[in-house]
Amino acid sequence: MLVALAAALLSGCGAAGAGSAPDGSGRTSDGVVTVFAAASLAEAFGDIGRGFQQDHPGTTVTFNFGASSALAQQIVSGAPADVFAAAAPAAMTTVTGTGRGPAPRVFARNRLEIVVPPGNPGDVTGLSDFARRELTIALCEAQVPCGTASRAALAAAGVTPLPDTLEQDVKAVLSKVRLGEVDAGLVYRTDVRAAGSSVRGIGFAEADRAVNDYPIATLAGSRAPAAAAAFVDYVLSGEGRKALAAAGFDAP
Amino acid sequence: MPPLLYLPAALAVAFLVLPLVALVVRAPWRSLPQLLARPEVGDALRLSLLCATAATVLCLVLGVPLAWVLARGQFRGRRVLRALVTVPLVLPPVVGGVALLLLLGRRGLAGRYLDAWFGLTLPFTTTAVVIAEAFVAMPFLVLAVEGALRASDRRYEDAAATLGASRLLILRRVTLPLVAPGISAGAVLCFARALGEFGATITFAGSFPGVTRTMPIAVYLALESDPPAAIALSLVLLGVSLAVLVSLRDRWLTGGGPS
């Protein structure tokens, strides 16, 4: 059985290796582009990745989605990433702070929305409900971009929130709402849209006071710089904009 | 022993020890007192010790009888039962957290009744941390105690019975003392596993300072915003783990167990 497992692993590696062979289309193709991207970009970048691969046969895009701050830390620690797309400039600065590599470019903006389970069991209507003790509330951890934005929005509304849990990224807040474990959370508008009918979004006026800029950059240590630059160009292109707009992002 | 084995054995030692050496070497010793004096560090440590202790007690109360049933019970399906009990040992803890949420969450199979009948919601409470830790740690205790029970010499119990001791007296005065080293070994493993628990806790109990944010979660979060603080916290966790191991190790050695 072990032999069979080893054989399967080896053949799996072989298949992945074959994907990086140069193709005859004449386009740049240096194999695999590894993109580290904010959790909120999962849906939009999924579409963008498919489109990019169609445009660049022979190039494979692999994604690692997570909290921007966590991804930044992984990149600084030497994780093999070619492109970083963050949900806030601060996380990008962690990575590009040394001044190496091309300057990051803002490719999208996102705003917060209140998210509640279908049926809105807590009768949540606005940010002021985040101070109600009897409700179970999930927010992002302060150091994560969605947490920073949530804090700014709540401060702008003059609300002192009483959260029950501080989640490590925006998708974790969303899943707690989806499971019905919390009465309300603050996530990005794009997350509400991606979750479809499994949650309900409630807009609020103060969302304008905490808009996130999403920067993207190729990384200095990239082993596939040409393909990485091509991917960034694709995100900034009309095709990329369209996919981002469809997911609910604003243009920068 | 064939000398050929020394090289891989030495590599294994290096592999297991060097990461911990790196942790100690890279530790911000000079700023350590300030880092550890922060209130959130004390909160996380207190919470971790409290929850791991409570989880160990819960595992002892429920796990020792279960080990007994597995070791001494005569019934069909005993092996299946043992396999089921071992599942949390091999299950990724995050999956355990999801499973707990689906059972005990506010909308969970059992949780919805807890909520409706008693107004009791477990997720995001310290109780949820204890439950998550006990879930992943109990198999360690059960397997250790079951092994000790199987290995113990039943003739002592038989002799006590022929001398007229009641079954409860035999349990108290003969069997339990015989397997005490197994129980304490299991309890130590159980405590250590509970102390280090991360995945099931963050999934089922969430993360809130002082309520559900245990040391491992604090380390994970600090690594993103403040790496020196993360190293300092890791050092504390390493120290606590070593202290637990050493203190109980002494007790086993001087306790005079049959092993």
Image (cartoon, rainbow, N blue to C red):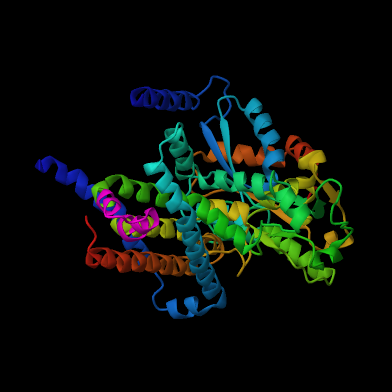
Q: Is residue A230 magenta?
A: no
Which residue is most to the top? A24
Identified at 40% across, 68% down, the residue is B240
Q: Please say if A47 is above or below B251.
A: above
The percent coordinates of residue A100 (x first, y second) are: 52, 56
* Residue B68 horizontal side relative to residue A243, left or right: left
Q: Please say if A55 is above or below A68.
A: above
Q: Please say if B146 is above or below A90.
A: above
Predominant SS of the magenta segment: helix
* Residue B251 horizontal side relative to residue A153, left or right: left
- The count of marks equals 0
The percent coordinates of residue A75 (x first, y second) are: 51, 52
The answer to whether residue A103 shows anywhere in this view is: no
Identified at 36% across, 55% down, the residue is B166
- Residue A45, quarter of the rendered image: top right
The percent coordinates of residue B170 (x first, y second) are: 34, 56
* Residue A122 horizontal side relative to residue B145, left or right: right
Identify the magenta region.
Answer: B158-176
Which residue is most to the left? B2
The percent coordinates of residue A141 (x first, y second) are: 65, 61
The answer to whether residue B211 shows anywhere in this view is: yes
> The N terminus of chain B is located in which quarter?
top left
Identified at 87% across, 52% down, the residue is A202
* Residue A37 horizontal side relative to residue A246, left or right: left
The front one of B65 and A53 is: B65
Identified at 37% across, 43% down, the residue is B71
The front one of A238 and A68 is: A68
> The C terminus of chain B is located in which quarter?
bottom left
Q: Please say if B122 is above or below B42.
A: above
